[in-house]
Amino acid sequence: MTSTFTCYYNQNHSKLTQKSSVKMSTQSLNQQLDVFLREQQKQAYAIALIHVKQETDALDVIQEAMLAFVNAYRNKPQHTWRPLFYRILQNKINDHHRRQTSWLRIFFSHKDKDDLAAEQASDAPSPLAIIEIQNKGNHILNIIKKLPDKQKQVIIYRHWQQMSETETAQVMQISKGSVKTHLFRATQKIKSLTGASDV
Amino acid sequence: MSEEPLKQLIKQSMDSLTQAIDTNTQVKLNEARHAAIKKSKHNYTVPWSWLLGAGTAVVMFLAVFLMQTQDAIPTHKEFVIFEDLDILTNEADTDFYQDLEFLTWLDANNIMDTES
């Protein structure tokens, strides 16, 4: 009788211990996620802002990217979080561009191209423009903004985020050869616009 | 020409972009981060143990209730027993039943006496 009771007690106690340890590991994982996202959020916001050009849109993209990352990749090894997070961020930026394009196409489809260009142009400077005005000597930023999307991304992830070719290819979902090609073209373009003597 | 100075220049430009983020935007980024971790589907646990316990309790309650209602409906055998009980508990004099054979015989003799 006593042994039966002891066995029953031990089984229940071990179950309770397992539940509490699972709860604690979930909390510690949430803390690690919080630390990681806190380290990346400013850089991710800057990348989003360069691509979408509006502050509210950039914040929306960041929110979507963070939620998607936590839901999909929280249980992945921590050393893989960084390329996975920026891959999701890039996908959300691409989704944003597609939504903008389809919305504009539907809403402005009956108007002329010149009227469309006039309506789409905003008189108010974007936050990115304000930052650029404030950093008058930051000519490079203006050049990066004007690059084609793939070249812009490869410059950001290779030179600013210091990612490897493999990680950059994973983020941009292209081959390593394409990363090299885009990087070469972007570098050449920046050099030509800044002047070879400046760099 | 080395690309190292260009890399440094690009890095400085992008770093200046992050440093220029205002406080209001930083607060919103913090809120987005907290909301993402809080809303994560892994943080919501379905209380399966509670549901299982409630279901078991309901089943047990129904079983006990059905057993109780079945006990309240008497069967044919119990009806017969009730009849016997009614007879047994009757306060009428039971000597009548003990002399039943005699009384039957007497009744028959009385009839015979009447005829004679």
Image (cartoon, rainbow, N blue to C red):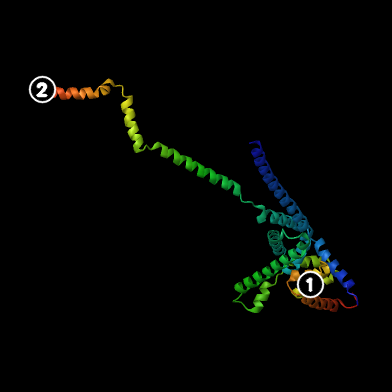
Q: Residue at x 70, y 50 (%)?
A: A22
Q: Quadrant of residue B34?
A: bottom right
* Image location (x, y in percent) of residue A147: 77, 75
At x 62%, y 74%, the residue is: A105
Residue nearer the viewer, B111 or A160: B111
Q: Amino acid at mark 1?
A: Val
Location of residue A144 in the rendering, given as x and y in whole percent from the top left corner: 80, 72
Asked which quadrant contains residue A7, the reply is: top right
Q: Would residue B115 appear left or right of B29 to someone viewing this image?
A: left
Judged from the image, the secondary structure of the residue bearing numbered disc 1 is helix
Residue named by callout 2: B114
State the residue in front, A5 or A144: A5
- Please state the horizontal and vertical placement of residue A31, each as a whole percent of the image: 75, 52
Q: Residue at x 51, y 42 (%)?
A: B60
Quadrant in the picture for the C terminus of chain A: bottom right
Q: Chain of mark 2?
A: B
Q: Indicate the quadrant where residue A47 lies.
A: bottom right
Q: Which dot marks residue A154?
A: 1
